[in-house]
Image (cartoon, helix red, strand yellow):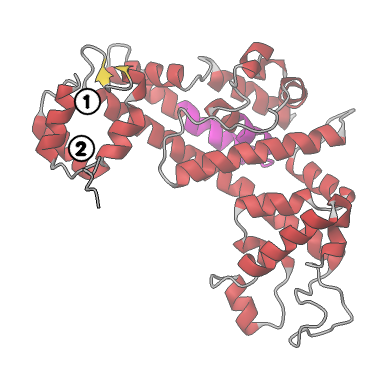
Amino acid sequence: MTRQTFDKPFKDFPDLIELLKSRGLNIRNEETAINLLKIYGYYPVINGFKKSFQTDFDEEKYQPNVQIEQLFSEFILDSQFQEILLTSIFPIENHFKNMLGYLISKNFGVNSFETNDANNPDNTVLSYLDPSNYHNSGRVKALDTMNFIKEKVLTSSDDPVAYYRENKNHVPAWILCQNMMFGTSVKLFQILPSNLKEDLTNEMILPIDNENITEKEGLLLLELEILRKFRNSAAHSSPVYLLHVDQSSDPSVKILKRYLGEQILTRKEGRQGIGTRNLYAALIGILLLTRNSGQRTNAIQQIKRLRDTYMQNHNDTSFDAYNHYIRIAQLPTDYVERLERASMILSN
């Protein structure tokens, strides 16, 4: 057997510092740098934020005069955006899943058992998980989605589903949806009958005059996927500043303008993925799908406070860090003001 050298051998902290210095990264205080790596990790800080500071990606050579503190500043700023994303997206996810469970229960009942199941309290009542309730989306898709939910969600060992399964004689849909992954709940939404899909869409996005419900449903699906991807990245502490969500189509700039105003986005920005795939797209999605005006205001205030903290001193390194971050993340320089104006439109 041929022996191979492991391409990622262990390196202790002093060796990591020497490696970074050999690639041109300036490290003025090695003790401070080592402490940063001990607390926050080499991969999250260095690998997560090195690209925008390098001139040679293959050799990983840094631009002249780049300090390790600059990478760390970008790491901290990205972590702060991640926190805003999580605290803003979780309520949207909960709202969506709560209403999904409500509409299914209201229209298809609460029986979670198949007809021939010995534990079925009443086998004359069709299960809300029966694929026939969702056939308008296609039999195969409905069957696959229901089988996954029965196998993975209904059998969950986590509460509240586990508690209901062990202490009640059925698991109603409003409980089942609490245990669903965000992506699974979106798949369930996709197979809903058209009238329920319309009801849930209007619950998530405020109705406007002369709207096209098919376009609105499409917009909701695209925005949910953007939020799901950014939520998952933030939940795993993965950088969000370079994250782009690629889908079969992007949210329509024209349709976004109808709901959020002309100022929210330009067609040129949309073609570049700005506001349709990137971090700004996630912020737009949060604004659009947060029905509670107080929560919308709170989200924008968090974003504004974050910006103001970094921008208050033009001579401070934090000012440069913030401007570098929003440029690399492709956030419009006036993105906070755009979101504020859009929030006012939604509130009116």
Which SS does the magenta portion mostly show?
helix
Q: Which residue is mark 2?
A: 36
Mark 1 Cα shell of 10 Å, populated few (<14), some (14-19), many (≥20): many
Where, by quadrant of the figure, is residue 293 drawn?
Answer: top right
Quadrant of the rendering where the C terminus is positioned: top right
Whole-Å distance between the Cαs marked 2 and 1? Answer: 10 Å
Expressed as whole percent of the image width and height from the top left, the position of residue 258 reads: 78, 23
Q: Is residue 188 magenta?
A: no
The label number, if any, that marks residue 175 in the structure image:
none
- Residue at disc 1, secondary structure: helix
- Read off the magenta span: 284-304
Q: Amino acid at mark 2?
A: Leu
Above or below for 78 versus 23: below
**Residue at (86% x, 73% y) in the render:** 126
Above or below for 81 versus 64: below
Q: Amino acid at mark 1?
A: Ile
Q: Which residue is mark 1?
A: 68
> CB under 8 Å between callouts 2 and 1?
yes
Mark 2 Cα shell of 10 Å, populated few (<14), some (14-19), many (≥20): some
Would you say residue 74 is visible in this rendering?
A: yes
